[in-house]
Amino acid sequence: MKQIFIYLCLISVISCLSCSKERGRSFKGLVAAADNCCSSTEGGRLYKVNILGTDSTITTVLPAEINLGDTIAFNMHATDKPPAVLCLAICLMPEMVCLSDVSKVH
């Protein structure tokens, strides 16, 4: 039982480190759709991003210079807090992921 606990702890630590800024783990994604129902109080718009090479789609706030169809590079951090978003009463609040170091890929 003690060995199982130690293995789980090691796996947890390794997975946290693999996505940290210090490790420079970055992803690429295609900006697929905009959500005009919600707006960010910090600026930027709410978008859906398809992570390239996977079937995963995330919802996030991106800077104003990012447009639909852009390919972007970014880091994802489990400990980051998502940006504050206000949504119209008729819309559901999306589950958001916070991205950092977002840049366009040409």
Image: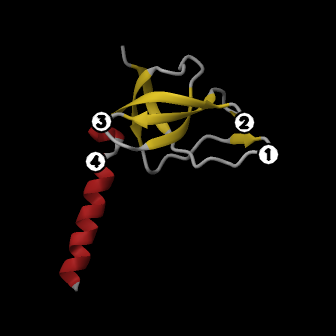
Q: Which three-letter amino acid code belongs to the residue tagged 1?
A: Ile
Which sits earlier in the primary sequence, circle 4 or circle 2?
A: 4
Sequence order check, earlier mark of 3 and 4:
4
In the drawing, what numbered circle is on residue 24? 3
Above-or-below relation of 53 to 17: above
Amino acid at the residue labelled 3: Gly
Disc 3 to disc 4, C-alpha distance? 8 Å
* Label 3 Cα neighbours within 10 Å, binned few <14 / some 14-19 / many ≥20: few
Q: Nearer the viewer, mark 4 or mark 2?
A: 2
Query: Label 4: which residue?
Result: 18
- Between 82 and 93, the one nearer to me in the picture: 93
Q: Which residue is mark 2?
A: 37
Which SS class for mark 3?
loop
Residue depicted at x 74% and y 41%: 87
State the residue at coordinates (66%, 27%): 43
Q: CA distance from mark 4 to mark 2?
A: 34 Å
- Alpha-carbon distance for marks 3 and 1? 39 Å
Outermost residue to the bottom: 1
Sequence order check, earlier mark of 3 and 1: 3
Q: Which residue is mark 1?
A: 90
- Secondary structure state at the residue bearing disc 2: loop
Alpha-carbon neighbours of circle 1 within 10 Å: few (<14), some, or many (≥20)?
few
Mark sitting earlier along the chain (4/1): 4
Are the two marked residues, 3 and 4, in contact with CB atoms closer than 8 angstroms? no
Residue that appears at 55% across and 37% down? 60
The span from disc 4 to disc 1 (Cα, nearest Å) is 38 Å
Identify which amino acid the numbered label 2 is placed on: Cys
